[in-house]
Amino acid sequence: MITWRAGVVESVAATWPGATELRVALDEPWADPLLPARVKGLAYSELVGTIAVGDRVLLNVTALARGLGTGGYALVVALDGRLPDDRPAGPGHLVKARYTPLQAMVLGVDDQESEHHDLLRDADDLRGMPVVVADLHSALPAIIAGARLAAGRPLRVAYVMTDGGALPAWFSRSVAGLREAGWLESCITTGQAFGGDLEAVTVHTGLLAAKHVVGADLAVVAQGPGNLGTGTQFGFSGVAAGEAVNAAVVLRGRPVASLRVSGADERARHHGVSHHSLTAYGRVAMRPADVPVPVLEGEVAALNDVIAEQVSYLAVMHRLVEVPAGADVRAALEESPVRLSTMGRGLDQDPAAFLAAAVAGVHAAHLLG
């Protein structure tokens, strides 16, 4: 299940909050001679300590060996021969990535030891806060861009990160960049995900923390970077988007179901509106949401008829809302402080993907009044 390697850190490359990119020379060759002897590594300092040039490290190279989409990283499991210093004992007893070798103990915002526990103990109402739900992590900056455009002012946005993709929030350069630019007020990691500004046990308490602790104008719920799919009806991590809609309604929020759209994906099940959105909102969500449907212009306008036909059956439960995705929305996306990329494609390669996410943000901002 795990392919291991050890090696020596030759250089430290990019760093961002919680993560360090390394260049590591491997001790042992691969069974496949085409694989490189030097690999790009990634270390989470909160888990393994500070890494320096010359350190020996133990690596999990499983996904790299299989050519899977981990960003091409060998993940540092531990320093070889040197332990990081013990952290001072502190409050918090939530264990995340539970019963794995790198399980981490954190202070949850809903933890009995948290200063916010009394506030959240009986909290059960989002008071109409818009909650934008998305399948892919790549939708996050586009949603915020659309919301800022429609609001005409900075907004307090909380990102509630589910555990369907990456578990450490530190893996996301988008979160780091959005936080630095002031576009994102807080990242709240839920379930088995960890490393956010706040930790929560469930999506429900994550949303309540967004409203009552962060004071967010709106929340975005999506998995971390990465997406698991099997080409089956229900075998993909994005089914959690439907459950997030349910959570938002139960907590008296205003769910906004962002559509996963593509005009460039060659897979039929993801062309136009992805079957991930149609299944999550059409089969998993049991409560109604607003579904912003982009009205595309220019070179992607041909998708409008396809999208309209695909989403028509969602109107049985949900409210379909046509939202223009014109030049102003495109311009707002171009001002994103972080790189827009989905499935390896940028704004120019697949504009429909980001325009569809942005109009969900536009609609959510309109709900603010």
Image (cartoon, grey):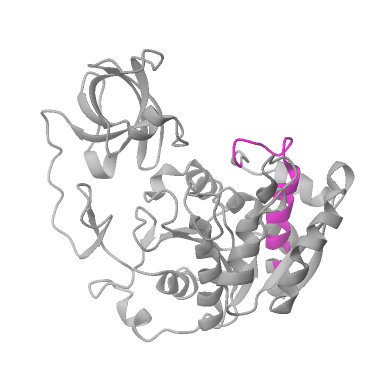
Tell me which residue sits at (39%, 17%) in the image: 35
Figure quadrant of residue 19: top left
Position of residue 181 measured from the top left corner of the image (x, y, whole percent): 56, 46
Residue that lies at the very extreme toward the front in this rendered image: 232
Q: Residue at x 48, y 56 (%)?
A: 237
Q: Is residue 246 something that shows in the picture? A: yes
Vertical placement of 266 versus 258: above or below?
above
- Foreground pick, 113 / 163: 163
Relative to residue 287, is residue 17 depicted above or below? Answer: above
Q: Residue furthest bottom?
A: 122
Compared to residue 141, the image places residue 62 above or below, namely: above
Q: Is residue 129 above or below residue 39?
A: below
Q: Residue 124 placed where, x, y %?
A: 45, 84
Q: Quadrant of residue 20?
A: top left
Give the camera-side residue of 230 and 349. Answer: 230
Which quadrant does the C terminus fall into? bottom right
Asked if residue 100 is among those painted magenta in the image, a careful observer would answer: no
Residue 64 pos. (x, y %): 39, 30
* Residue 362 shown left or right of residue 343 in the figure: right
Q: Which contiguous range is marked in magenta?
A: 342-363
Q: Position of residue 303 (x, y in %)?
A: 82, 50
Can residue 325 be seen here?
no
1 displayed left or right of 293 = left
The N terminus sits in image quarter: top left
| Displayed quadrant of residue 57 | top left
Residue name at image x 39 percent, y 45 percent: 170
Looking at the rendered structure, the number of numbered marks drawn on it comes to 0
